[in-house]
Amino acid sequence: MARPSRTEAVTWLLFSAGGMAAALVVPVLLLLFGVLFPLGVLAPPAYEHLLGVLRNPLVRIGLFMLCALALAHWAHRFRHSLGDLLRVRALNTPIAVLCYGAAVAGSVWAALVLFQ
Amino acid sequence: MTANPSPARLYRPPVSRLWWLRRRSYLLFVLRELSCVFVAWFVVFLLLMVDAVYAGNDSYQRFLDWSGRPWVLVLNIVALAFVLLHAVTWFNLAPKAMVVRMGGRRVAPRFVGAAHYAAWALVTVVLAWIVLGGS
Amino acid sequence: MPDTITMQVARYRPETDRAPTIQAYTVPLRAEWAVLDGLNYIKDQLDGTLSFRWSCRMGICGSCGMTVNGDPALTCGTFLADYAPGPVRVEPLTNFPVIRDLVVSIDDFMRKLPRVKPWLIRDGDSRIGAGELLQTPGQLDDFKQFSMCINCMLCYAACPVYAAEPDFLGPAAIALAQRYNLDSRDQGAHERLDLLASPEGVWACTYVGECSAACPKGVDPAGAIQRYKLTAATRTLREFLLPRAAR
């Protein structure tokens, strides 16, 4: 008898929120910090300014939400992709546990870094 | 003529493990899915940077130097390409997945898509302004 | 345009063959001929043993779906001239077991379709005297696209998830469930939830989108599935958090 899956409902909602957050926020931040600043195209922000921004409680909470949701997005999508590509049924549960577990661990790390 | 002939042997074609290489659209799909790995990489990169900033100016400078190393730079350029792929495919698919109603009528999908891109532009400008505000 | 074109047709005779083979036939290349016309020419003039399904030959019955040059297609709406100078390869529809030659078994779909309850469900019976169920053009537009499905199964042939996971309900079945969920006259959405929100329902779909690309009637089953994911998620959680209120 088919029953609605609560875990899929939750993981999909997190995946969706994470995908939207990542799509909106990550490109510009990665462009700046990952490419333009290291290449010297733009001057990186002064230390005091960046520290000031990152000390702001709203920024900390916002970045934590971004990290947690982005990791949830990765976990859900990666788990399904691995399943589709490998197609070994016995591996499905271990893959799911590893992926969601890693997302939780990563979120804990994010909290430790951001709220130190 | 028998009344109930035995069922003929059905042929079940094998499914290739390289199914995703068969069509361009499948390949694009797999690339889109793998973009999530680079989203996760960005989270790691971001947390390393935040950690470095909280630890002081010296560690912040060391982080900037490290991010200029060739392998890190190449990784981030590749990551940026994949993250852009993620964003574009996300915003293009969003209108098909949501039906928005205003004033009792359905908003045309292209306006829903345009709204997403507009939000993306706004967020980009605001974040860039915040980050660059001090330099 | 040359006079003829070669059709490479998959043959499978379960009495004698272990696996399908390809047999080549040369058929006339007429500007207005579809692949189906070529197959009928083969059966009438060249090889009466070739087996394939077809009926309306105008894209409404859904019988003639096959794989043409690797793509799922309705052979009545796919034209030989578009493949000139050829050859054109015609194989049975992907992801379905082959009964004979180009004929596949769609038993799996026939079992899944009634499970989504693709009919109007009403709370209690209405008497004839109560009159018709009224619907505005706007309400019709809400579900009309999903009612265009002709059960041709091209979407199942295109779906890589169905290829790997035969338990997956599949694009057409879910689109047809949505056709009723979104119909203002229907009151049975909660009856379809259990199956649609199960792991073999919408959650197995990873939005590849190939089903909508393959659909000859513009149904967009991928869109139907994605829309239902939000419904399924919110309803599932609401029933978990507020079991009485949700009913």
Image: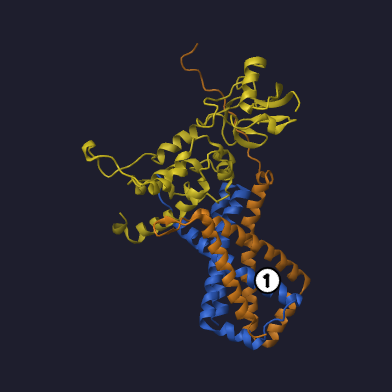
The tint of chain B in the picture is orange
Quarter of the figure that contains the C terminus of chain B: bottom right
Q: Which chain is yellow?
A: C
The answer to which quarter of the image holds residue A75 is bottom right
Residue at left offset 66%, top offset 55%: B31
Q: Amino acid at mark 1?
A: Leu
Which chain letter matches label 1?
Answer: A
Q: Is residue A19 visible?
A: no
Residue at disc 1, secondary structure: helix
Residue at left offset 31%, top offset 44%: C134
Q: Where residue C66 appears, x then y in whole percent?
A: 60, 32
Q: Which chain is blue?
A: A
Residue C102's place in the image compared with C221, above or below, is: above
Choose between C129 and A67: the one closer to the eye. C129
Residue C195's place in the image compared with B125, above or below, is: above
Q: Is residue C224 visible?
A: yes
Q: State the residue position of label 1.
A: A31
Choose between B84 and C134: the one closer to the eye. C134
Residue at left offset 34%, top offset 41%: C120
Side (left or right) of C247 relative to C103: left
Residue at left offset 52%, top offset 46%: C220
Q: Where residue B3 appears, x then y in whole percent?
A: 46, 14
Side (left or right) of A3 relative to C1: left
Q: Where residue A91 appears, x then y in whole percent?
A: 58, 51
The residue lying furthest to the top in this view is: B1
The answer to which quarter of the image holds residue A44 is bottom right
The answer to which quarter of the image holds residue C176 is top left
Side (left or right) of A78 relative to A17: right
